[in-house]
Amino acid sequence: MNDSVATVAILGRPNVGKSALFNRLVGRRLAIVDDTAGVTRDRLYAHAEWQGRIFSFVDTGGIDTDVAEHDHIWACTRAQAEIAAKAADLIVFVVDGSDGLNPLDEEVASIIRKMRRPVIFVANKLESERARNGAIAEFAPLGFGPPTAVSAIHGEGTGDLLDLIVAQLPPQEPLPSTDDVLALAVIGRPNVGKSSLVNALIGEERSIVSDVPGTTRDAIDTLFQFHEQKMRLIDTAGVWRKSRAHGDIEYYASLRSYKALERADIVVLVIDSMEGVMAQDRRLAGSALEAGAGLVIVANKWDLARELGDFQQNELIDVIHQQMPFAHFVPVTFLSALTKRKLGGLMPLVMRVHTNRRRRIPTAKVNNLIREATLAHPPPMISGKMARIYYASQVGTAPPRFLFSCNDPDRISSSYRRFLENTIRASDDFEGVPIEMEFRSRREESENNS
């Protein structure tokens, strides 16, 4: 994580409660907690504050040396944990105090010693004084001294642990300004190439890449820079259609992907060029626009699709827009994340949408535009009465928001609202950006201003 705050990595064998401890320490349920070993696979970051000190925690997947050599995902999980540990300023080594010393704990301890980082030894799941006293002696062979006893589920001992962490952190460095950091979320169905695209963009194996659907389960933030623009890139778990089809873990991972949309400025929706637009793609696009984010559609695996036929991109763009009529203003780009072919066109497109999302039209121009439009195409009569629009102005950006003063908002039909939106879009570049429109009667405005 390219941040100036200190980083604390949480390591241990599978199912010792690392994610539960992570959630407790950061004060939010960010990591998925489940009794199934291996739920956390990628690195998950979050900022925390204690005693006036801001620092970053990173939750890692459980290190299992018995299967790492034979299983690709477990090997990647171990590699991700080791990368996080090497980059950390401090390691929190977690064992299961209720389960006792496990041979895997000794293996993890051996790996941690090679990192040459300060270590705080923690025994989790210790709710009683008797259990705490027994753990102190049982884990002595690991050579990290008496463990700090905590119960992540009940919150016992976590305050003392945070005190220890703050005491061992390196000196505080100035925090970077986040005023102009663009939050970019990468979303899509499972196995469409989201993690491959993230890795291609930032130039490192930041997220585990696998052909197994559902490999990425948590929303992951990575800071990087494109020219002068600082970016926070969110690689999200693939969104499954139904929870019962793939289990609770994938379902809650999907919820976190939707949650990521709420904090994104721009969303990159990755679809599979080989499969075309699916129902879940349409739902994701709609959710991104409803959240007020700018949207770019990436048709990935374009190189494979070209091998199957002589497709023209313009024709496919028209098909995508026909299948997503509510997103007709969203740009579509074609690339191959794996080979990086045509990758160079994505970020300039993202920046253009980012600029459009912050675009502001002067009030005089908006009024003239709407006046001419309503004169040329008056609102239709409803129940023998016509709606009248007195004036309009842009009252917000990111996303652009327009306020219309009229005699009766209920008389502005949905089709006429679309006409007004298209009029605004034809006047200025709002490609990739949802436009919010609010209609108020003069009476409502008077009450709001009083």
Image: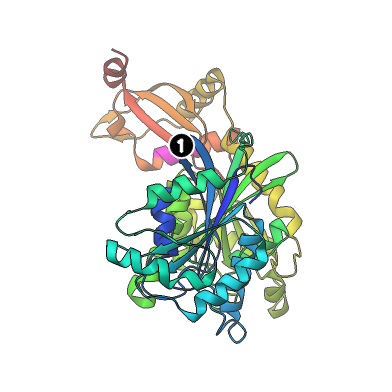
Residue 107, position in %: x, y?
A: 57, 77
Q: Nearer the viewer, residue 261 or 419?
A: 261
Q: Horizontally, is 74 left or right of 259 in the view? A: right
Q: Horizontally, is 119 left or right of 279 in the view? A: right
Predominant SS along the magenta part: helix
Identify the residue at horizontal 56%, vertical 61% (top origin).
43
Q: Secondary structure at mark 1?
A: loop
Q: Horizontally, is 28 left or right of 69 in the view? A: left
Residue at numbered disc 1? 51
Residue 186, position in %: x, y?
A: 56, 57
Residue 112, position in %: x, y?
A: 60, 67
Residue extending farthest left: 383
Q: Nearer the viewer, residue 421 or 122?
A: 122
- Is 420 magenta? The answer is yes
Say whether residue 255 is visible. Answer: no
The part of the chain drawn in magenta is 416-421
Identify the residue at horizontal 48%, vertical 48% (top origin).
164
Residue 246, position in %: x, y?
A: 39, 76
Q: Horizontally, is 444 left or right of 186 in the view? A: left
Looking at the rendered structure, the kind of residue marked 1 is Gln
